[in-house]
Image (spheres, rainbow, N blue to C red):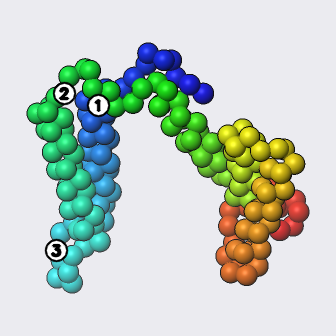
Amino acid sequence: MNAPEGFRITRFAMEMAMALFTALFGVVVIIGAREYGTAWSEFGPEPGFFPFYVGLLICLASAGVLYEAFARHRGPDETFASGIQLGRIAAFFGPMAAFVVVSVFLGLYVGTALYLFGVMVVQGGYSVARSLIVSLGVTVATYVLFEIWFQVPLLKGPLEASLGL
């Protein structure tokens, strides 16, 4: 999973993107906080008081990052990540994103088993038999630990329902 060799992201573009992303996150926090009230009532601060100011601080910090990005603009030559580096990042985060999606639809135990098996075989180069033993063993151990010992039910899917777990 490699990006094209000549592909790269400049540091300036990444700083701009992160500043805008965090500013958007701050705005979402502010809007959410306003739904619960941000004033000071006779009983103390309303529930949205603290999140409102946290969102405001996030927006101010984002503006500072944006200012620094323009003030220290380093030109198009400074690379944040090359195509090879981006490919490695995608190889690391791709399986984790797939784990989250699979866990939502098939349950956490099936997602854990598939994630461990896939990562061990594809990225780790382990044999299929060893990967199968480890992934199923970890999944069973996780089930025993959470469901039986701690009695904390985790996200289950159709397989667990069909097995009556």
* Residue 96 located left or right of residue 127: left
Q: Nearer the viewer, mark 3 or mark 1?
A: 1
Q: Which residue occupies 21% across, 76% down?
A: 45
Amino acid type of the residue tagged 1 in the rendering: Arg
Between the C-alphas of marks 1 and 2, the distance is 8 Å
Q: Residue at x 19, y 42 (%)?
A: 65
Q: What is the secondary structure assignment of the residue under circle 1?
A: helix
**Residue underneath mark 2:** 74
What residue is pinned by disc 1? 11
Is residue 3 visible in this depiction of the protein?
yes
Q: Residue 85, how many percent across, how many down? A: 47, 31
* Residue 110 against residue 18 in the figure, above or below: below
Rendering coords of residue 47 (x, y %): 29, 71
Query: In terms of secondary structure, where does tag 3 sit?
Result: strand
Could you say which is closer to the camera, residue 164 or residue 119?
A: 119
Residue 81, by quadrant, is top left
Query: Which residue position is annotated with label 3?
Result: 40
Of the numbered discs 1 and 2, the one sitting upstream in the chain is: 1
